Image (spheres, rainbow, N blue to C red):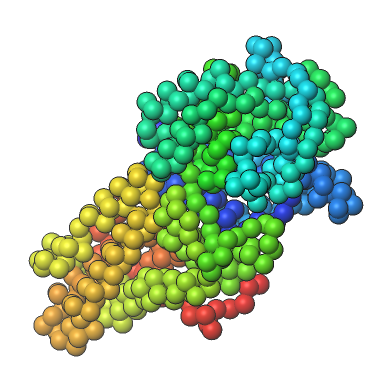
Amino acid sequence: MAGSYFLTTAIDYVNSAPHLGHAYEKVLADFFARHEKSIDRDVLFLTGVDEHGQKVQQSALAKGVEPQTFADEMSAHFQRLHHGLGVASSHFVRTTAETHKAIVRDWLQRLHDKGEIFFQEHEGFYSVRQEQFVTEKDKVDGAWPEIFGEVIETKEPNYYFRLEPYRQRLLKHIEENPEWIVPAFRRKELLGALAEPLADLCISRPKSRLAWGIPLPFDENYVTYVWFDALVNYFSFASVKGQLVWPPDLQIIGKDILIPAHGVYWPIMLFALELELPRHLLVHGFWTNSGAKISKSNAKSLIDPVPYVEKFGPDALRYFVLREMVLGQDADFSDERFETRYNGDLGKKLGNLVQRTISMVHSYRAGVVPNYDGFHLTEVDAALRSDVVAEQYKRAVAEFAPHLALQAIWEFVAQANLYVEETAPFKLAKDPTQAKRLDVILGLLVETLRRLSVLIQAALPFTAEKIRVQLQLSPGPVRLDESLFGTSLRGHAIGKPEPLFPRLEEKPPAS
């Protein structure tokens, strides 16, 4: 093994059904996890759901069920989505797990024993939607931003966690580790948020107002603030065969939860407990719906990923979201853009290349890959065998740019399709004197399909497997570096061609 790799996603709140944003973040993490496995790393990949808090309690009450029953039902929706998309996490996190509750209480007790948590009465404003206290400086143009929803005035005693004593240490860490937050402009936003002294974090809610949470170990009349509870999941599930894996190599989050949750609360919690910080925080943008902002408060704006998976297959959605979003920026979803990618990139380009290559081997060589070893290669042949695409792909992944990785692969797909047009094997097949030349072309094209099956396996795992099945190669996942060329395929019998991405009218209904 080339070592271990530990990555996490944010855990999703179960007060409402999953939408495209949830699907994207999990596919993004799964892409990186599969890539790391392909370079022979032992991967720990955490994702899951956040099941405590006021919004869950309210949603359960509205349905007339117990919070745990509601959490069970909603968690199942997220698990089904992950399964349908091929998100192969190591653990599906649920914050109602007893092991997690025990670690949350242990952390709270340790911080309380160190004097980092104290009790006081607070009077101020409270955001019901965000389940957090806010101040006048959070207003924009004199009004509370939509993200806070209803804001009420409240006065109650609670427990607080000291943040300000660690602000300078956090600033120093950010300045000394410029790659800690990706992309770089998010780092500047966090530095701006840390320019002023930090208010203490309220880490409790009275049971009289909120019963659905983890009780504080030092005061059973209070439960843990949902964000403190949720952040601990990264540690409480960070084990393999009982052995702690720490710190995370990569933590993937949306831009709305960098400040303050993951950029302030989380590192300061780790500082206070003398634990290493994650090596990278990867901050992605939001999806819009045909140009309109997606909001839970506007049900019509939400995009349910399930119908797209059922109609087009999981890899179509995986490809779209990974290719369309420039990491850190927002991206737009529309049916027109989606179908253009499906019909164009996936159907006409990749699907067509695979189908006609396999068809030609069957038509001209009875389904057996001809001998092309040691034959003269033209400049065009050599270009198709170049390792440039692999280097471009690996560089893009190292730079956390899946869209560029896929762009490089599809440029290679275009190159292969152009190769077919330029070499015209369908014409050479009619000339017996060109038999050796035809052997080279067919051999290189089959080799190209094998390489593509390896290059796309992190982004399109189901399609990669279908290509390997049609080539009658051993199933994946496959080592990236060692399997791009592999052993000669001469004399290898391949299977029959099957459409990878059928035209929409040919797509069978989901069973």
Residue 145, x across and y down, in percent: 63, 48
Q: Is residue 470 left or right of residue 139?
A: left
What is the count of numbered marks? 0
Instruction: Give the left or right position of residue 324, taking residue 389 as reference.
Output: right
User: Can you say whether 360 is above or below 185 in the image?
Assistant: below
Seen from the viewer's position, the closer of residues 340 and 151 is 151
Residue closest to the eye, 229 or 352: 229
Residue 115 location, quadrant: top right
At 22% across and 54% down in the image, what residue appears?
Answer: 387
Above or below, 43 against 439 in this view is: above
Residue 441 found in image quarter: bottom left
Location of residue 268 in the rendering, given as x and y in whole percent from the top left corner:
56, 24
Task: Give the x, y percent position of residue 237.
Answer: 61, 33
The front one of 314 and 190 is 190
Q: Indicate left or right for 357 with 191 as reference.
A: left
Q: Is residue 496 visible?
A: no
Residue at 67% from the left image edge and 67% from the top image edge = 300
User: Residue 177's image quarter?
Assistant: top left
Locate residue 125, reporting x and y percent: 73, 36
Q: Where is 13 relative to 419, above or below?
A: above
Foreground pick, 469 / 174: 174
Can you say which quadrant of the picture contains the N terminus? Answer: top left
* Residue at 71% over, 49% down: 149
Specify whether residue 463 is in view: yes
Which corner quadrant holds the C terminus?
Answer: bottom right
Of all residues, the one furthest to the bottom in this rendering is 430
In the image, residue 359 sits, relative to residue 278, either above or below, namely: below
Is 70 positioned to the left or the right of 264 in the image? right
